[in-house]
Image (cartoon, rainbow, N blue to C red):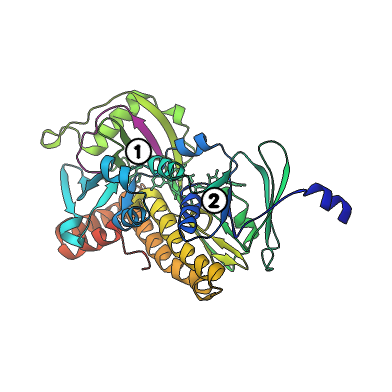
Amino acid sequence: MPGGIRCRWLNRMRTQVAIIGAGPAGLLLAHLLHRDGVDAVVVETRSQDYVAARVRAGILESSSVELLESVGLGGRLRAEGHEHRGIYLQLPGERHHLDFVDLAGHGVWVYGQTEVQKDLVAAGTAQVHYEVRDVALHEVTTDRPFVTFVDSTGAARRLDADVIAGCDGSFGPSRGAAVPTDQFERRYPYSWLGILAEVAPSTDELIYAWHPDGFALHSMRSETVSRLYLQVPNGTEPADWSDDRIWDELATRLGHGVDGWQLTPGPITDKSVLPMRSHVRTPMRHGRLFLAGDAAHIVPPTGAKGLNLAIADVALLSRALVSAVLENDPRRADSYSDDALRRVWRCTHFSWWMTTMLHATGDPFDAQLQLSQLRWVTTSPAGATGLAENYAGLPIGF
Ligand code: RFL
Ligand code: PHB
């Protein structure tokens, strides 16, 4: 009924790029577009505080840091983030350091996703509608795509755009609107129990531990906050693990007491369970809808790639959209999916490889293969360099 439709969408707006999702991919894309003079509007279901407080990734590759710095987002990162030369790999009774700077020419930065998110909000460059609902994408295969939603006041809105960027993670509506040609999926038979603890890290750099009881990781957020993970069976509830049980298991797997190393426990302020999966949908474009970040691909966190991939995607996408929208040149937009997927598949492989090398499966054959691979990586410069190059990161545009 045309009359009804006109009435319903009285609140009509227009922008050049409609962005769904104000996570790191969506807000960074809005920031990059703003710098190049492209107008963008972001819609987000959650509140600004909720998005900023979500505890997620903690490691930035140096190419991510360079990109953030080049667009005015590096101040607090350089002042408060910590540059790490490499990581430790822990086997029962042995700890090995891999020095990425020596092996691959650069290290990584410890700087939480929460902090990246706060810096993006503080930049004030993104026009965001928070706490919206009923977000739907329309006409994405035409040259007049639009988004409808109900804003935080309860008003129905329509946002017309030249293109839509789906940056709404793995549960948002963009995935449904972008009909994939292919989907690739791997589910893993284990999850991570992650904790945040108010205690100084017991290590100067991250420790990735192989142990017959399961994988463990010691990471950190600051001089006073530690982030640690334990491999647990799928279906585990955080409440199944008391604080004491968590610290005991972390101590065992991370090698407390070996060569005098001590894991210092402290008050746990956050406990959550994260299932592990790899997922890639191709292509990352459907008509005038472009997917970026978790909306297009999920990696298990063992390679610390999720946030870095989201940043690399939007670096490519912003350039493509600037050319398409401002210069009427579609070539970069046409190659966006292929260009982004080269890095996506490299990181998907690396994340799968780190995950399957480090997690216990209960199968003795798997365990021997893992130990053999870990011995190679910790003793052969070629093996160590391969890990270092992938972990410390490839240049954006790889
Ligand atoms: P995000 O960060 O999920 O942001 C998507 C945003 O879209 C919003 N949204 C909607 N907006 C509008 N309309 C809708 N209908 C919407 N539905 C959803 C969401 O509220 C959200 O604000 O995706 P983005 O920007 O692509 O960024 C990717 C990274 O967040 C992600 O790759 C990493 O954080 C992955 N990840 C982790 N990576 C690590 O390296 N280490 C970790 O410890 C780690 N922990 C995690 C994680 C991802 C998690 N998720 C997505 C389940 C822990 C969790 C719980
Ligand atoms: C984290 O600090 O949350 C973190 C670090 C490295 C990973 C995964 C998560 O591989």
Choose mark 1 or mark 2, whichever is in front: 2
Q: Which residue is mark 1?
A: 230
User: What x and y, as percent, mark residue 327?
Assistant: 53, 72
The answer to whether the residue bearing label 2 lies less than 8 angstroms from the nearest atom of ligand 1 is: yes
Q: Residue flagged by tag 1: what amino acid is it?
A: Leu
Q: Which mark is residue 31?
A: none
Q: Most extreme residue toward the left, as rendered?
A: 259
For mark 2, give the secondary structure.
helix
The one of 179 and 257 positioned closer to us in this rendering: 179
Quadrant where the N terminus is found in the figure: bottom right
Nearer-N-terminus badge (1/2): 2
Q: Residues within 10 Å of mark 2 (few under 14, many from 20)?
A: some
**Coordinates of residue 369 in the picture (x, y in percent):** 28, 57
Horizontally, residue 146 falls left or right of residue 5, namely left
Residue 314 lies in the magenta-colored region: no
Q: Residue at x 34, y 55 (%)?
A: 64
The answer to whether residue 114 is seen in the rendering is: yes
**Label 1 Cα crowd, 10 Å radius (few <14 / some 14-19 / many 20+):** many
Give the magenta range.
193-206
When the figure is inspected, residue 98 is found, relative to residue 211, above or below; the finding is below
Depth order, front residue of 70/391? 70
Q: Residue furthest front?
A: 37
Figure quadrant of residue 131? top right
Q: Is residue 188 above or below residue 197?
A: below
User: Image check: 60 left or right of 46?
Assistant: left
User: What percent of the width, then of the height, locates residue 248?
Assistant: 28, 28
Residue carrying label 2: 170
Q: Amino acid at mark 2?
A: Ser
- Residue at position x 23%, y 47% in the image: 83
Image quadrant holding the C terminus, namely bottom left
Query: Image height check: is 338 above or below 102?
Result: below
